[in-house]
Image (cartoon, rainbow, N blue to C red):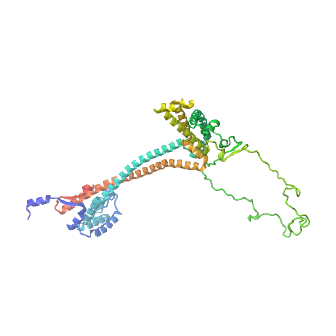
Amino acid sequence: MFSRGNWATEQSLPIDIHTGKLVDWLISRRHTNRDWPEAVRIVREKINNAIQDMPEHPEITKLLSGTYINYFHCLRIVEILKETEKDSKNILGWYGSQRMKDWQEVIRLYEKDSMYLAEAAQMLVRNVQYELPAIKRTIAKCDTIQQDCERKEKDCLKNAANAKDKYLQTCKQIGITGDRVKQELLELLKELPGELTNIAGKCKDLKEARQLYRDFLSFTLAGEHFECLPLLSFVMERGNVTTYEWTYGEPPIRVEEPKVEINVEDDDEGIQSDEIDFGDLDGGAGAIDFGELDPSADIDFGDELTTGEIDWGNLATEEAQGINWGVGEEGETSTVDIIVEDSGVAGGVAKDAEALSVLGNPKTRNQFIDELLELEGFLTQRNYELQSEGSVLSLNQFSGAPETVQYHAVESTTKMLSCVQNIVASLTSTKMQHLYLISMSSRYVDRLTESLRTKRSVGEKMIASQAVIQQKSKTAQEEQAVLGPKLQLIGERTRELQKQIEEEISKKYKNRPVNLMGVVNAL
């Protein structure tokens, strides 16, 4: 037997129960039966029926909202009904109100075999293991989504700005603003002849450089026949004339430039009908009106023919008709006058590629650029030789050369080289390359326009993505705002339920302290 001191010590020992095993602990200690879930279904049906007829009371409204109704809620509802239904109480202390009877029946069924304790334990386990962690994970997920959306939104803004900068930079290289791409490209194409004329005018500044190159070749290739920069010399003398003049040596009488048809506006119009309008037809039958014909009348083929035969002429009586070949009598020599036009290209008409200017024709333009690069290469090498340490030896080697070769200094060759490089840069710039291609092909205009629109659409897509991301962040924020109060409410009800279960179990063990472990961590 335990002494009084041992009994006191045992009463002070707490009963620790893991929350996840609470239901099994109650069944193993025979506080409830294993078939309690089937009995709870009957109680839940009675609760659902009793809820349909409830008095208006703020505390009852609070109890019925937010969480699953349990035994302890039913106790509180009965306490409230004692105040609201006190008028139905008889002399013996029994309540005549059906509301009170329904809820008292619910409590009686709950207390049978401590079924309420098993249900409350299951609610606590569900809250601790599932409800609270799920809400916390969802809130954490919403927070992560908002952070990701904030980062992605910054990236979208940055990428949109970069895409816009690239688009504007490309437009700047071409020479347009980018507001109406195709229209601006066509307007820019009108500047091409003037640009080429200006470049041809700058070539006149290369006379000294061309002369230096000619004298150098004459000295180094003595006795050999060579042609030095023919097209460059031609452009320097005559300018950016037609390819016809470069080919034949004289200007054409008329120039028929090839035109590139470019549709500025998108073709949005529907296909028009090509049907022929015959006007209003008689009777709507569509028959052709040949006039009023007498069915008995014959067709008039002429006065002489009554039988309707075809008139082949008087073949039987007339002489045979021969073909006139343009010759005289028999025995005479036939003559045919042939008109021979003047030889040469006088009166020629420049068509197709010959109508293009020298710098506008791809073939002659490439030759012109090659000659410029040839001159640039010579000036670069000559400039390097004059700057090198062996310049004295170089002077001795060119002692017999013309004065233009001997006495040119580094400053003059550098100036010549800079002039050539500027002309080459003007001809091969991005703007000029696009203008060349636009002038030769209408399909290239469409491709270039589509390419620029694609680059512009990248920024527009980024802005659209930013709006989608903002909406996603807003949705996550709204969901988080709803889950926050819900988490707090379930947490409060879970703490309350934990305390109530601990008190009920403690009563069964002579008020020994009971601790449900794992609830605090979940909260």
Give percent across and percent down for residue 485.
33, 53
Using the image as rendered, state which of residue 315 and residue 378 is in the foreground.
378
Image quadrant in which the C terminus is located: bottom left
Give percent across and percent down for residue 428.
55, 42
Using the image as rendered, state which of residue 504 and residue 324 is in the foreground.
324
Q: Residue at x 15, y 58 (%)?
A: 13
The quadrant holding residue 18 is bottom left
Image quadrant in which the N terminus is located: bottom left
Residue 433 visible: yes
Q: Residue at x 51, y 37 (%)?
A: 381
Q: Residue at x 34, y 66 (%)?
A: 49
Q: Decide if residue 75 is on the left or right side of residue 2.
A: right
Q: Residue at x 25, y 57 (%)?
A: 519
Give percent across and percent down for residue 227.
61, 40
Query: How many marks can you see?
Result: 0
Q: Residue furthest front?
A: 223
The quadrant holding residue 11 is bottom left
Residue 184 visible: no
Q: Residue furthest right?
A: 317
Q: Decide if residue 41 is on the left or right side of residue 3.
A: right
Q: Decide if residue 64 is on the left or right side of residue 14.
A: right
Give percent across and percent down for residue 73.
28, 60
Residue 267 in the image: above or below residue 104? above
Q: Decide if residue 494 is on the left or right side of residue 206.
A: left
